[in-house]
Image (tube, rainbow, N blue to C red):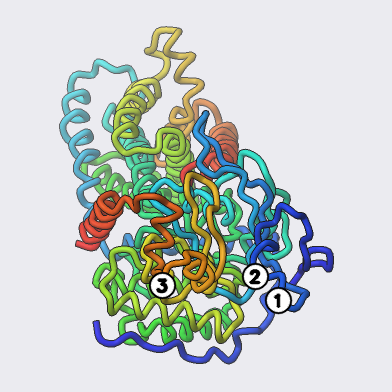
């Protein structure tokens, strides 16, 4: 961990984490991700609006929000794909704007679409990323073997990814993004369009990385059951801002209604959940994936 | 799918990573990793290469035959068919390369570009890797044109160095124009717009070159365009290396200098623009 001491505790009063329950957590708390007034504007349209957020290490952090809330844009900035309009961020103690290529060494990223190369085998998909991450040859073979095992794909490693199911592709992508042992894994809607069994497989896999290896996972989702099932902490984003932040239980308790569900919390902060829009997008994503996989 | 597997323990998880080396060697390794993947895909589905062979065959067999008999194009001591064979090779390399941007946009739509850009790979390695992949694809055209030319009785230079020079020129030309294509793809970002731009670019590049007629025939404004067109230098290199009785108009040193330096400049521009695909 390359964080220097001053980064271990952030004491800016604007830091939303400090208003929450984490005050009581014994210090030093390790903020593995910190953003300060991170903003993305397209012309006059503000997509991410001055986000100041800290995420501590070794947990699953969920970004929830309706369509267009800026979740994916926020994540794209954190994984160095999108330059912020203003603001700063540090990822694993590295300044995002100064050293994007060092940040890339510390993170894994799985975009929303099923993006494994369907013209290559599972093994080859892993191989190309092992090469891009500069793993030495011997280490490469070992880690690829291990990754295939973790994803439960050892038997189909030599089959084209075009023959895989959605869940298998997602599992492959997640182990691909962790070949270089990143400190933080970013997942953009990891289970969108997958069937319930596949979703549980992904959840177990993600949980395994956090529990067994102390990895930090940041994921976006608009599925309340997903947030409920695996997220240690969540932030509810609406119109580019964080409206609520805390553990699932804290947010439910804050509702002051008996047996409040995460849906209640979400509706309270996000207004209407815009279900029709979400469902339409799910269908579109699934269809696109299906068409690609023939 | 059966029940999902549990994560198995990973004993060597905490092994320290080798420090990320930014060495020329690592740059080349990553570049060739990209090329390697493309070759694997090509081996799996080589049908593209066969369909690509049809157009140059038609040019050589139909256009070439007719104009050889017409004797309307002054090509010195060379029969017109001999003169045009290297030009058609350059043309088919150009056609392969100029639409390579479509593949880049395809990878963008799938999210593959995003994943690659989120790795610590130098952008120039990603771009050069794409360019050289197009070069490998273009090599198949050399094979086809050599065969057709030999079959038509074109007097070829079979000296191994000359043949090697042809192959290098083909790879360079494909890398050059596919990188140009990648730059266009980074700017327009959608397939529809790219197809429009691609169509508009191809024919002017082809006709404003010495591929099927010598520059000396051109009006002076077109001569100026032809001299600024990298395809002219590729054709010149191919013509002098591929044919038995030919010479280079600009000199091979000039030809390869133009091809290499243009490719490098375009790669640097492409590396700057490539991240735009992920936004």
Residue that mark 2 sits on: A21
Q: Mark 1 lies on which chain?
A: A
Q: Is residue B46 above or below residue B274?
A: below
Depth order, front residue of B23/B239: B23
SS at badge 1: loop
Give the spatial CA distance, label 1 vs label 3.
27 Å
Q: Nearer the viewer, residue B278 or B178?
A: B278
Q: Mark 2 lies on which chain?
A: A
The answer to whether A156 appears left or right of B122 in the picture is left
The residue that mark 3 highlights is A258
Q: Name the residue under label 1.
A: A25
Residues marked 2 and 1 touching at CB (< 8 Å): yes
Q: Position of residue A247 (x, y in %)?
A: 54, 71
Which comes sooner in the sequence, label 3 or label 2? 2
Q: Is mark 3 on a helix, strand or loop?
A: loop
- Residue at 38% over, 26% down: B205
Q: Mark 3 lies on which chain?
A: A
Q: Residue at x 19, y 19 (%)?
A: B70
* Front: mark 1 or 3: 3
Q: Which residue lies at the image location 44% right of the left edge and 85% below the top edge?
A: A150
Residue A106 horizontal side relative to residue B34, left or right: right
Q: Is residue B25 visible?
A: no
The residue at the point 28 percent across, 27 percent down is B80
For the residues labelled 2 and 1, the Cα–Cα distance comes to 8 Å
Q: Position of residue B170 (x, y in %)?
A: 43, 44
Image quarter in which the N terminus of chain B is found: bottom left
Please, what secondary structure does the residue beneath circle 2 have? Answer: helix
Instruction: State if disc 2 and disc 3 touch (CB < 8 Å).
Output: no
């Amino acid at each position: 961990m390359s964080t220097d001491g001053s980064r271990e505790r952030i004491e800016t009063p604007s830091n939303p984490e400090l208003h929450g329950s984490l005050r009581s957590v014994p210090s030093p708390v390790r903020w593995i991700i910190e953003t300060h007034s991170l903003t993305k504007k397209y012309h006059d349209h503000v997509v991410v609006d001055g986000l100041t957020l800290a995420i501590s290490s070794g947990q699953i952090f969920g970004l929830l929000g309706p369509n267009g809330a800026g979740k994916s844009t926020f994540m794209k900035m954190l994984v160095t794909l999108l330059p912020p309009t203003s603001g700063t961020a540090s990822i694993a103690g590295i300044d995002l704007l100064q050293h994007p290529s060092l940040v890339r060494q510390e993170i894994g990223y799985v975009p929303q679409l099923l993006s494994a190369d369907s013209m290559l085998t599972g093994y080859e998909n892993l191989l190309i990323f092992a090469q891009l991450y500069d793993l030495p040859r011997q280490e490469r073979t070992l880690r690829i073997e291990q990754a295939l095992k973790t994803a439960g794909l050892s038997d189909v490693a030599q089959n084209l990814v075009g023959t895989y199911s959605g869940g298998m592709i997602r599992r492959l992508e997640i182990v691909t993004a962790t070949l270089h042992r990143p400190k933080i894994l970013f997942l953009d809607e990891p289970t969108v369009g997958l069937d319930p069994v596949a979703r549980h497989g992904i959840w177990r896999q993600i949980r395994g990385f956090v529990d067994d290896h102390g990895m930090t996972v940041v994921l976006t989702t608009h599925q309340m059951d997903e947030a409920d099932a695996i997220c240690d902490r969540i932030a509810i984003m609406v119109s580019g801002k964080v409206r609520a932040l805390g553990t699932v239980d804290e947010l439910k308790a804050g509702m002051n209604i008996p047996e409040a569900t995460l849906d209640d919390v979400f509706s309270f902060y996000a207004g209407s959940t815009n279900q029709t829009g979400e469902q339409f997008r799910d269908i579109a994503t699934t269809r696109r994936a299906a068409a690609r996989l023939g | 799918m059966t029940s999902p597997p549990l994560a198995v323990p990973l004993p060597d998880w905490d092994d320290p990573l080798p420090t990320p080396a930014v060495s020329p060697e690592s740059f080349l390794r990553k570049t060739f990793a990209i090329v390697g993947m493309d070759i694997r895909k090509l081996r799996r589905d080589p049908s593209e290469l066969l369909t690509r062979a049809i157009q140059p065959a038609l040019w050589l067999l139909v256009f070439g035959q007719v104009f050889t008999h017409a004797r309307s194009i002054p090509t010195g001591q060379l029969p017109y068919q001999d003169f045009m064979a290297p030009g058609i090779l350059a043309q088919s390399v150009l056609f392969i390369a100029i639409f390579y941007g479509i593949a880049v946009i395809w990878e963008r739509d799938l999210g593959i570009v995003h994943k690659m850009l989120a790795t610590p790979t130098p952008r120039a390695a990603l771009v050069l890797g794409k360019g050289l992949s197009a070069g490998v694809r273009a090599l198949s055209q050399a094979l086809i044109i050599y065969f057709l030319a030999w079959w038509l009785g074109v007097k070829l230079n079979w000296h191994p160095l000359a043949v090697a020079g042809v192959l290098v020129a083909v790879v360079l030309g494909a890398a050059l124009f596919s990188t140009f294509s990648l730059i266009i793809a980074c700017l327009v970002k959608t397939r529809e717009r790219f197809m429009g731009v691609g169509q508009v670019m191809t024919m002017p590049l082809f006709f404003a070159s010495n591929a099927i007629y010598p520059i000396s025939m051109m009006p002076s404004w077109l001569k100026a365009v032809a001299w600024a067109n990298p395809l002219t230098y590729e054709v010149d290199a191919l013509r002098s290396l591929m044919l038995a009785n030919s010479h280079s108009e600009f000199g091979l040193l000039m030809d390869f200098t133009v091809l290499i330096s243009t490719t490098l400049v375009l790669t640097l521009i492409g590396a700057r623009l490539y991240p735009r695909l992920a936004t």
